[in-house]
Image (tube, grey):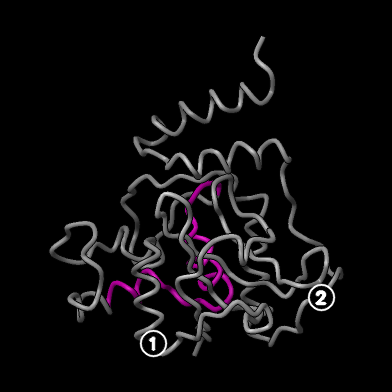
Amino acid sequence: MLSKRAFLWSTLGLAGVLASGALIPSYRMRVAAQLLLDGAQAPPEDGGKLFAEPETWARTLIAAAESQIGKTVRYDPAYTALAYPNGDVPIERGVCTDVIVRAYRDGFGVDLQKLVHEDMRANFKAYPKNWGLKRPDRNIDHRRVLNLAVFFRRKGAALDITDRAGDYLPGDVVAQRLPGNLPHISIVSHRANGNGRRPLVVHNIGAGTRLEDSLFSFKITGHFRFKPA
């Protein structure tokens, strides 16, 4: 009889190949297996250790991101035809960028799908060509970390990348590089980690939206503060 760990590995391995026809990167699969063993998360309650007092807009953004915890429980990178504007995949699944897109949409009515698509349509040459596309694709462009990073930079939201936790304020968006050269993105919260030295982040690294202490766990490739107009 398979142990719980072995069962999870076998199930997730199969899911990585077959889920929605999309191959989930092996590193994210390993992370998902460990997180599932750790147990499900629920949205955090008010209170707890504070890392920094958030501005009003940041508190709204973080609350919208944290509201996804316990609802988005899968990492699923499958290409999906979306409605436009305000298109989304079902809330129970998504990728790291969906955390950011949903938070801005739910918190402020800011539709990054529409904003990124319009900017790419007008300035396509400014965006990465990693996927061999010759024109914008409103189904997927806003769900790619590299495109969001370019969009935030073009909107004047880029900040310095440092190794000082205090430079990362609540509501900041941080792009990272995971093992296997995988791009990743998360939202910095106002909540402190166990020793109070770092802010926790809200992200989906492999097993749904979670609040975790991973700000400096991976190389940071982008630091942004995109305040809604």
Viewer-side residue, 198 vs 7: 198
Looking at the rendering, which quadrant does residue 19 occupy?
Answer: top left
**Residue 227, above or below 113:** below
Secondary structure at badge 1 equals: loop
Check disc 2: other Cα within 10 Å, few if <14, some if 14-19, many if 20+.
some
Viewer-side residue, 181 vs 131: 181
Q: Between label 1 and label 2, give the one nearer the viewer.
A: 2
Looking at the rendering, which quadrant does residue 24 occupy?
Answer: top left
Give the tally of numbered discs. 2
Check disc 1: other Cα within 10 Å, few if <14, some if 14-19, many if 20+.
few
Q: Magenta part mainly helix, strand or loop? A: helix
Q: Is residue 42 left or right of residue 85?
A: right
Q: Is residue 144 one of those drawn in magenta?
A: no
Return the x and y of residue 135 as percentages of the image width and height. Answer: 16, 66
- The three-letter amino acid code for the residue at tag 1 is Lys
Viewer-side residue, 177 vs 43: 177
Residue at the extreme left of the image, as rendered: 134
| Magenta region | 92-118
Residue at the extreme top of the image, as rendered: 1
| Disc 2: which residue | 50
**Residue 142, above or below 32:** below
What is the number of the mark on residue 155?
1
Q: Residue at x 50, y 80 (%)?
A: 224
Q: Residue at x 58, y 45 (%)?
A: 207
Q: CA distance from mark 1 to mark 2?
A: 29 Å
Secondary structure at badge 2 equals: loop
Q: Residue at x 48, y 68 (%)?
A: 175
Return the x and y of residue 150 as percentages of the image width and height. Answer: 34, 76
- The three-letter amino acid code for the residue at tag 2 is Leu
Q: Is residue 176 left or right of residue 187?
A: left
Q: Earlier in the sequence, mark 1 or mark 2?
A: 2
What is the number of the mark on residue 113?
none
